[in-house]
Amino acid sequence: MYELTVESVFSAAHNLRNYEDGRDEPVHGHNWRVRVTLAAPALDDQGLLIDFKVLKTALEQVTDELDHRYLNELEPFLTVNPSTENVAAYLYRRLQSRLPRSAARLKAVTLYESDDAWVSYFGE
């Protein structure tokens, strides 16, 4: 089994609704780091799992949608809290829809809201 991983960063603000005692959390921002891992049992005819450039481009397109934005105002988070868990799942789904069909499958999206706090989402 092969695994291939790339990383990217984006900055965005958010706050959780109904956080404590029914009150919203104060608005705050993160310099998010996202790690994406693909996996496949074999390589293609070129000896690749996927071209790094293809995966990096797809990831950049997805993170650009969130970069320097207030996540609570974006369509996917109007009714769903923009928690790190929900943002990781959103990134997974958006990235999966942008990747070319191949033997490689999107294994996980790991989203770091800080150096010592992160979430991994593995899909449904």
Image (cartoon, helix red, strand yellow):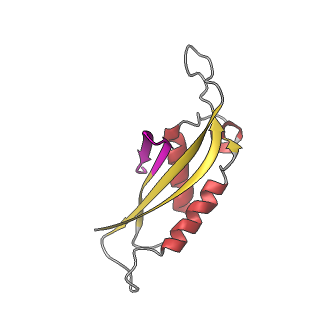
Coordinates of residue 24 in the picture (x, y in percent)? 63, 22
Magenta stretch secondary structure, dominant: strand
Whether residue 74 is in magenta: the answer is no
| Residue located at (63% from left, 46% from top) | 11
Q: Residue at x 41, y 60 (%)?
A: 37
Q: Residue at x 50, y 46 (%)?
A: 88
Task: Please tell me which residue lies in front, 121 or 69.
Answer: 69
In terms of depth relative to the viewer, which is nearer, 79 or 21? 21
Image-based side of 18 in relation to 120, left or right: right
Q: Is residue 100 visible?
A: no
The magenta-colored residue range is: 110-124
Q: Is residue 9 above or below residue 113?
A: below
Relative image position of residue 44 (x, y in whole percent): 38, 81
Camera-side residue of 24 and 27? 27
Q: Is residue 116 magenta?
A: yes
Quarter placement of the N terminus: bottom left
Q: Quadrant of residue 18?
A: top right
Query: Which residue appears farthest toward the bottom when viewing the image?
Result: 45
Q: Looking at the picture, does residue 90 appear above or below residue 72?
A: below
